Amino acid sequence: MKTLEFTGALREIVKKLMIDELLSTLDLWLAPQNNNNLSDGDKDAFHGLLFDSRSGFNRLMEKEASAKILHGLGVPAFYDPGRLRRLLATVNGVQNLAQVKPSVELNSYREMLRSFRNLVSTCESLLEKEKIGTTEPSQGIFQLELADYDGKGIEPQRLVLLATTVRELHANLARLFGIESDSLRFTYFDSGSALLLGVQCSKEIAKTISDLLLQWWDKIKFSEFETLDKKMDAVERAAAMAEKMNAAIKAGVVDELTGKNLTHRIFQEVDTLIGIGATPPLEAEVRVDQRALILAKRDVKLLESGQQTDQGKSNES
């Protein structure tokens, strides 16, 4: 599992387990100055949070990746039936918050939740924020996941083709959008079952590339069983790109012929990325199934061409 995939999974766990909501409630109840009455509505709301948290836990345990994290961090202990029964009995048996404060069960449960939340925050800070860094407001980041075809690593020629294609794709979009000066940077690399790359450029170009990759990949996923809805969806996507091209022509950024040529090149470069196994980041739960699709769609001729080019350059040098 990649580092950023791990921190993303932790965020999903926090959300599904209602960690922040449960902590907010318990922090309010156990605050020294708060001795208000505990209404039936307050009790029902707490019951609802616990049940929703348990339901989220059950859903997360159905996924192999999140289940491993939950077990590794000891989260199943949060939902020990005896503990949950004692928590509910404690809340049901009091009339005001002054009676809640001495509860060992509630205080212990809050500390468990707080420790887990602190761990997640630390992981996000050390494993994610320091890796990604900060981005200027005018800049954006798009991600590419480069597949390891055989589990033995990624061939150098694919990295060369990826860098070259991304550079050309960025240059053509910059020209189409009339962006004269824009730096392109590979800002982070994250390895695991595949290589994840973060690429920084102007926000408009980054979003366009992300959207195009997602749309192209969706088209490939559903290509074997096209429906009318899928065909209409594909038309709408093509129209969205055509709209960008027409806007550039209307604004005088490029002429009509240049605009069409640039759009054609952009689609070719996106197709090239998919052909070398560079896709939008895939969810861990579907990566195994979609790896076969990536293998089936890889452009062997393109890879061989890239290898020959590298060898030719080596011979020349």
Image (cartoon, grey):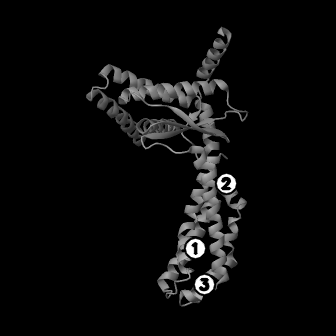
Residue beneath label 3, please?
A: 101
Indicate which label's residue lies in the foreground, 3 or 2: 3
Seen at 43% across and 39% down, the residue is: 203
CA gap, disc 2 to disc 1? 23 Å
Q: Residues within 10 Å of mark 1 (few under 14, many from 20)?
A: many
Quick one: 228 or 148, which is closer to the camera?
Answer: 148
The residue at the point 58 percent across, 65 percent down is 17
Q: Amino acid at mark 1?
A: Leu
Please tell me which of labels 2 and 1 falls first in the chain: 1
Q: Secondary structure at mark 3?
A: loop
Toward which corner of the image does residue 73 lie, by quadrant? bottom right
- Which secondary structure lies at badge 2? helix
Reading the image, the residue beneath label 2 is: 64
Residue at point 70% right, 70% down?
77
Amino acid type of the residue that numbered disc 2 sits on in the rendered structure: Glu
| Up-down relation of residue 304 to residue 196 (above or below) | above
User: Badges 3 and 1: C-beta atoms under 8 Å apart?
Assistant: no
